[in-house]
Image (cartoon, rainbow, N blue to C red):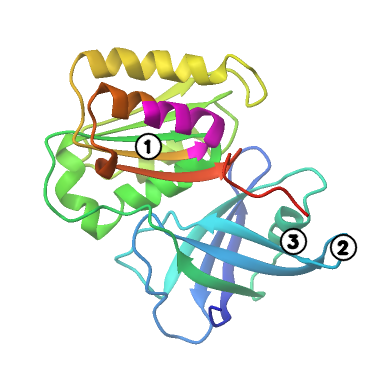
Amino acid sequence: MAAPRTARVLDSQPLGLNVRFLDLVMSEGGPLGFVGGQYIIVNTGVSLPGGKVAKRAYSIFSSDAEQNRFQIAVKRIESGPGSSYMHSAEPGTNIPFSGPWGQYLPEDSRPRTSTWVLATDTGITAALGLVRGTKFTPQLPGSKVIWFVPARDYFIPESKAREMIPSGCKDFRLEVIPDTQAVERPAAVRALIREMAEKGLPESVFLSGDGNVLYPLRDDLISAGVPESGIRLECFFNNPFKKAPA
């Protein structure tokens, strides 16, 4: 079991529709020790039905060049205990968490001719953390970042995402796709990526966000010729491998 840690809220500001930007600093003063693309799990202390405590994962989207201070974005979920707790955290609040966690990382620092970073919905936070990471820098010149959302005001502003993309990144664009509940959603993304693949396959692919979209997309890419070892996937929701509550 990971040792509990705490971070203090330095600043909390609205960022887009029902989204909160939290600027945090390590309470114990030492480095967080994260790599771009990783996340923390916050222990909200809020009790859930059945006696469990609400714990929620949040990707770090700030650069790992700074380790004592980091940023996350939290989308408010209606009646969601985790996001409600985070949205109410005022400057000075100590946030208990564990981490960093996750394997959504560059395999190594070797430059790639072509890297695709494909994110849906709130998965953009993991994508931003990844491409801003120091180990990812050699891949930036050949990297394309595509963010799939059901509406341009769905999460953080597009302008904010563009601002956070490193200047050395080859391309960034936003694509509007059907809503998370729409049955045609996976097919819409797969069709767009199929068009890209016809012009040339990437050496590396990073996928983050909606599992209903990403797992079929991963299978398509493997079938097209992308090595499975060259694909990293971070599922934010609709994880087909997650066990149902007992």
**Closer mark to the observer between disc 3 and disc 2:** 2
Q: Residue at position x 58%, y 23% from top?
A: 150
Alpha-carbon span between mark 2 and mark 1: 42 Å
Picture coordinates of residue 216, whole percent (x, y): 46, 27
User: Judging from the image, what secondary structure is the residue with disc 2 in?
Assistant: loop
**Residue assigned mark 1:** 162
User: Mark 1: which amino acid?
Assistant: Arg
Which one is earlier in the sequence, the residue at label 3 or at label 2?
2
Q: Give left or right: position of 199 versus 20.
A: left
Picture quarter containing residue 162? top left
Mark 1 or mark 3, earlier in chain:
3
Magenta stretch contains residue 191: no
Q: Which residue is mark 3?
A: 85
Q: Amino acid at mark 3?
A: Tyr
Give the label on residue 202, or none.
Answer: none
Cβ–Cβ under 8 Å for marks 1 and 3 = no
Task: Determine the image quadrant of residue 141.
Answer: top left
Near mark 3 (Cα within 10 A), the count class, few <14, some 14-19 or many ≥20, is some
Mark 3 secondary-structure assignment: helix
Q: Which mark is residue 50?
A: 2
